[in-house]
Amino acid sequence: MKNQNLRLSIFLGLLICVFVPTHTVAKPLEGNVIFIRGGIVIELEERLKTSNEPDALSPSPSLVMREASEPAEEIFPAWIDDQRALATYDWTSQTSYHVTFRWTDGSLLEMDTTAPLKPLPYRIRTVELEEPLSLLANLQNPAKPTTVAFSTDGAQLAVGTNAGHVAIINSLTGDRIWKTRISEGYAKHAAFSPDGKRFYIGEQSPDGFIYAYDLSTTKPTLLWKYRMADDIDTSIPQNPDDVYAWVQYPGPYRISTTEEGDLLVAGNHSWTKDGVGLKKAKLYRFDGETGTLKWKWPPDQSLPMTISWFDYSRDVKTVATLSYIRGGGDTGDFRSGTLHVIDGETGETAWEYTFDPLKPYFEEVTFWRGVSVSPDGRFINVTADDGRAFIFNTVPPPAETKPVWETNLTTPLEVSDIPIIATNGTIDATNDFALFVTGTTFIPYH
């Protein structure tokens, strides 16, 4: 009986120990909330012991955003360093928020703030590139970064150099995830697949390879590669040792991944042979995972001009590209200064439009990028180097191919009888708007 009472007393004692509540006062934290594009940054005055590694004993911090008259939303930020955390959040400008940031030790930052009219530019991190990219491997001719690309979620940053080195870096921590050297060529353009599991890099070199790497394995492995020189030729520069010899090799001018995971590539090759300037170009669509070529345009020959840029609708049924050649030359069945609209499923030309030169200032039509397609594929926007801007309606297909709108966006203005023009090659599109960005002024030279 005594033993039973003793066991009961011990059991009740344990219950009392377990169920007695503890009252811990949250330690206040001081800091700021900064609204950036696509999210917010929490800046703390105190350094905390932080980690982004998943750990059941050390869960992520909690961030609760409450908008007036709206339910609270809990999100889980990632640490930039011991005093800063970054969270993805779709905030509304000029809106008041109650922000609660709670760390795992009970520390609490609580404040009311108002989102600005526009997001603030914010430096996440400065990454020294010498070590991850071996920039000083050749002291007589140090390598230079030539291309950058972010993964869709912004977690990975790829950087390539003119010596063929490529590194993938953690955007938040600055740590190098992976490094390789694709060749001694020029790393020209790069892209990630939408899910971040594949990485594509193209080189400007005698071969003009496109490489696809699998990032889902412990060590990234090569999935496939494609040699563009088989389509647009290879060449030997007049002076192979010249620092700019790479410009005479074939290479990708743009690499882009679709939402389905396919890969679109524009390959250009411009070189001189026996004193004659030559150009060849090709547009490709690959299966991003297998490297299977779905189509290439033109299908039976190379384009004897430069592809300045391309863009496409979200469903990739409409692909638009621009082509030109300076100073004339034999272009065969193609015409310089042309917008080509391509069926993205078959690779066949749907329709074309050739622009007339803006005389007396220009004798030919050229482009710098200057093409965008609305996500729904209904509109194509174009800017020419002469300063004109155009919009084409693609749905229904035009019975008479011509722009539905055009304007003299940055065409020449004469100042003291000298024509002045401005750049306008950076453009974009939504389903409702055509976006044109104008830049610096200069005197036309062609």
Image (tube, grey):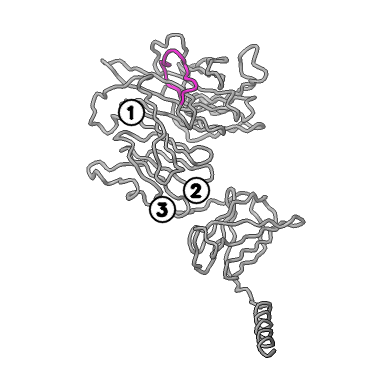
Please determine whether, in this image, residue 231 is positioned above or below residue 55: above
Mark yes or no: residue 114 visible: yes
Q: Position of residue 105 (x, y in %)?
A: 57, 70
Disc with the residue nearer the chain's start (3 vs 2): 2
Classify mark 2: helix, strand or loop. Answer: loop
Q: Position of residue 299 (x, y in %)?
A: 46, 15
Q: Which residue is mark 3?
A: 175
Q: Which residue sits furthest top?
A: 333
Task: Return the disc, 2 or 1, that comes first in the chain's sequence.
Answer: 2
Query: Can you tell which quarter of the image residue 58 is in?
Result: bottom right
The percent coordinates of residue 85 (x first, y second) are 54, 59
> In this rendering, would 61 be left or right of 265?
right
Per the image, the residue denoted by label 2 is 155
Of pointers 3 and 1, the one earlier in the residue sequence: 3
Q: Nearer the viewer, residue 221 or 395?
A: 221
- Using the numbered discs, state the Cα–Cα distance from disc 3 to disc 2 in whole angstroms: 11 Å
Q: Cα distance, mark 3 to mark 1?
A: 32 Å
Q: Is residue 208 above or below residue 341?
A: below
Residue 88 is labelled as: none
Q: Quadrant of the N terminus?
A: bottom right
Residue 299 magenta-highlighted? yes
* Furthest-front residue in this view: 1
Label 3 packing within 10 angstroms: few (<14), some (14-19), many (20+): few
Position of 86 relative to 28 (above/below): above
User: The residue under label 3 is which amino acid type?
Assistant: Asp
Identity, as a three-letter code, of the amino acid under mark 1: Val
Q: Closer to the observer: label 3 or label 1? A: 3
Q: Nearer the viewer, residue 19 or 5?
A: 5
